[in-house]
Image (spheres, rainbow, N blue to C red):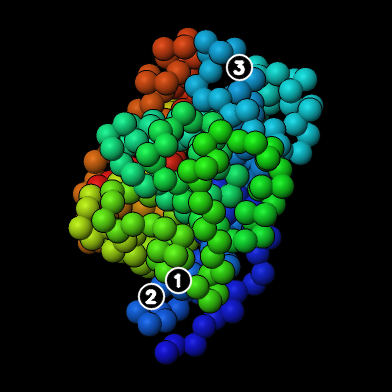
Amino acid sequence: MPSRVQPPSATGGSREARLFKPGGLGKCQTVFDNKILMSNSIFRKDGTAQGVAKQRLIETLAKPDKRIISDSYAHRFVMGAGVIKLMGHKLSVWVTRMFAPGFHEHLISRTRFIDDLIKDSAVGGVEQYVILGAGYDTRAHRLELPSSLKIFEVDQPEVQARKRSKLPKELPNSENVTYVSVDFNHQSLSEQLFSAGFDQSKSAVFTLEGVSQYVTKEAISSTIKELAALSPKTSSTFFISYVDKLLDEDPEACFGKGYPNAVKRAETIKHLAAKVGEPWISLYTAEEIEGLLSQNGFSLIENKSLADLNSVYFTPVGRTLPENQIFNLEHFVIAKS
């Protein structure tokens, strides 16, 4: 058995924020009895989790007829939530645009895209929903999901404890949520899911959101392979997001025409990620992602970005983003096995 590389301790934290950390599975995974053991280092920091929750909070402050998503729990995870509430939706979005035009809309479109996937999957009869690195994800409670959908929130024990301490004791749909605590230094994801009641004979949807850029490509491939093995006799649906390789090769192509200082902003985004210890180490082309999925038994169904979803989500509520505010460097993929 190969020796395990001990990872640095992680602070844990979130959904967007922490499933995988730099070096993730690729550096720290160990094959033990032919099962992939994923280390603590695949979990990322609480600060990023708060950042995503912050954007959900801001969107929730929009007028009901202008709102793309709503999360009545997001404020519980955000430092300074009271100030943001005083600022309101429009001012908060304006402040975000000073950093990166379209950044708020990008994260909200990703959130809504997954929301729609989960709701559609439930309506279509899918019986299990596995949230990898659930962290501060609140879909189990803020979406009106049927009782027939069993939800597994996978994360480290300390992360789950922190999340639950921030949430109210009485939550909608809580009886259908199972917290799957995994010590990735010593436990197999598959074994922990089986112990928690995951049923291989039932269909499932898996989500891996805001993660792939922080992890080696080998690690992502191994993870997808393991997920495919979890539902060998039934169909499963898989969501993954990825950052476009053009961010390195032609950064202007990752933003809308006329986007201000596109090259400089691309460098700033990558620099800030590295500065907080979460460098973007794996970028993909659309062909790479499709090939990676195909190698592991999944067929690509959709590949979208803010450029595609602008007219779907924002135009109907009178919030169409102009071309020079399109933040287009991350793609949202749905695949099926």
Question: Considering the numbered disc 1 on the image, is that residue within a helix, a strand or a loop?
Answer: loop
Q: Mark 2 or mark 3: which comes first in sequence?
A: 2
Residue 160, x across and y down, in percent: 62, 54
Q: Mark 1 or mark 3: which comes first in sequence?
A: 3
Q: For residue 62, which numbered disc appears in the image?
A: 3
Q: For residue 311, which numbered disc appears in the image?
A: none
The answer to whether residue 182 is above or below residue 35 is above
* Tag 1 near tag 2, CB within 8 Å: yes
Q: How far apart, in angstroms, are the residues tagged by discs 1 and 2?
A: 6 Å
Residue at 20 percent across and 58 percent down: it is 233
Three-letter amino acid code of the residue under disc 1: Ser
Q: Quadrant of residue 103?
A: top right
Question: Considering the numbered disc 2 on the image, is that residue within a helix, a strand or a loop?
Answer: strand
The answer to whether residue 60 is above or below residue 28 is above
Question: Considering the numbered disc 3 on the image, is that residue within a helix, a strand or a loop?
Answer: loop
Residue 260, x across and y down, in percent: 55, 29
Q: Residues within 10 Å of mark 2 (few under 14, many from 20)?
A: some
